[in-house]
Image (cartoon, helix red, strand yellow):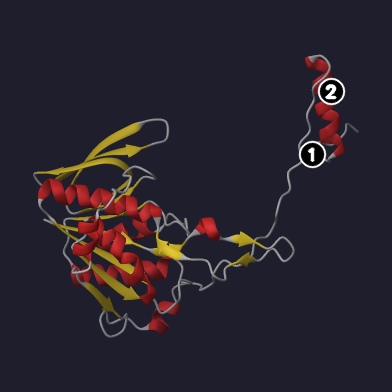
Amino acid sequence: MRLLTLIKYSLDTAEIKVDPTTKELRMSGVPEKIGNIDKNAVEAAVRLKEATGASLQALCLGPLAARDGFKDVLAMGLDEVFLVEDPFAGAAEASTAVSVLEAAIRKLGPFDLILCGFASDDGYTYQVAPRLAERLGLPLVSYVRQISVSDGQLKADRDLEDSLQTVSVPLPALVSVAEEAFPPRRTTLMDALKAKKKPVSIWHIDADLGLAQADLEKLGSFESATQVGVIVHRKQHMFKTGSPAEMADQLIDALLQENVLKGAA
C-alpha cells in the first residue's frame, strides 16, 4: 500500500503584523514553516502507515528553503519528501498549484490514498483538495476526524460541525483532514537522527514534470497578499443602570448615534 501526504511551506501567520498607517502587511522577516494544518495531515498518514505497513511519501510545492522544515515531518515518520521548486514564489493561485501537484502525483504514483489538510495555514482557499480530486478522478472525503483502511475500503468520520458522518469509499481516494483532528506527535532525538538519513528529492516543473512556466501563468493570477483593506477599531458601550426596557432604549440611542440604525422618518 502506498500513501502520499501533501505539505506546504507556508508563512507563520502568527508573526504577520499590519502597519496601522499604510494598512500594509509587514511581510519582511516573517518566518516560514510546514503549516500546522499540514502536520495534522502528516500525523494522520503516519498513523495509517503504522497500522497497515504502507510506504509514506510527501509532496511539497515550495521554495528550496522548505528543505529546512522537512526535518520535523520526516522525524514524525515520513519515508521520503519530494519538493517541486515553486517558480512563482508562492504567488500562484490554486488552479496553477493543482496543475503542478497533479503532474507530480502522476509521475510518483499511483497511490492508494492521498492525504492533505482541509486548507493551508496562510491561504485558506479550501480549493486544493477538491480540485485535485477532480483532476485525478478520485473520490474526495473531506474534513476527516477518524480514518481507517481495510480490504481496499476507506472508512472515515467526517466533521459536519454539529454532527459526524461516517462514510466508506473504495480506494484509491483523496482525504482532507479536519482542523486539529490529528495532533502531531512529539518526536525524539532518535527520530531526528533517523530523519537526517531520509531522502529529499528536488524537482523542477520543466525538466522533471514537463510543464512550461508560460503555460502555467495563463491559468490564473499571481498576486501575494500584502494589503488589508480595512482595519476596524471596535467601540464598546456598557449599560449598567436602569430597567431592561430603559437599557434597551439606551442601546437603540447608541446605535442611532453611530448610524448603525436609521431613525424613523
Return the residue nearer the eye: 42 or 117: 42
Most foreground residue, 100 or 189: 189
Q: Amino acid at mark 2?
A: Asp
Residue that label 1 marks: 260
Residue 40 in sight here: yes
Residue 147 to residue 59: above or below: above
Tag 2, which secondary structure?
helix
* Mark 2–mark 1 distance (CA, rounded to whole Å): 14 Å
* In the depicted structure, whether residue 193 falls above or below residue 177: below
Q: Secondary structure at mark 1?
A: loop
Question: Which amino acid is tagged 1?
Answer: Val
Image x and y of residue 119, in percent: 41, 54
Given the current orientation, which residue lies at the most extreme top position?
243
Which residue reaches farthest right? 265
Question: Compared to 122, does 63 lie above or below?
Answer: below
Q: Label 1: how many residues lie within 10 Å, few (<14), some (14-19) or many (20+)?
A: few
> Do residues under tags 2 and 1 come within 8 Å of each other at their CB atoms?
no
Residue at 33% over, 71% down: 67
- The quadrant holding residue 161 is top left
Could you say where residue 25 lies in the image, as x and y percent from the top left? Answer: 62, 65
| Residue under label 2 | 249
Q: Earlier in the sequence, mark 2 or mark 1?
A: 2
Rendered location of residue 52, percent (x, y): 11, 48
Please report the residue visible at 36 percent of the width from the left and 45 percent of the height from the top. Answer: 178
Q: Is residue 4 visible?
A: no
Q: Position of residue 42 (x, y in %)?
A: 28, 54
What residue appears at the point 83 percent right and 19 percent down from the top-left corner? 241
Looking at the figure, which quarter contains the C terminus?
Answer: top right
- Quarter of the image where the N terminus is located: bottom left
Q: Quadrant of residue 157?
A: top left
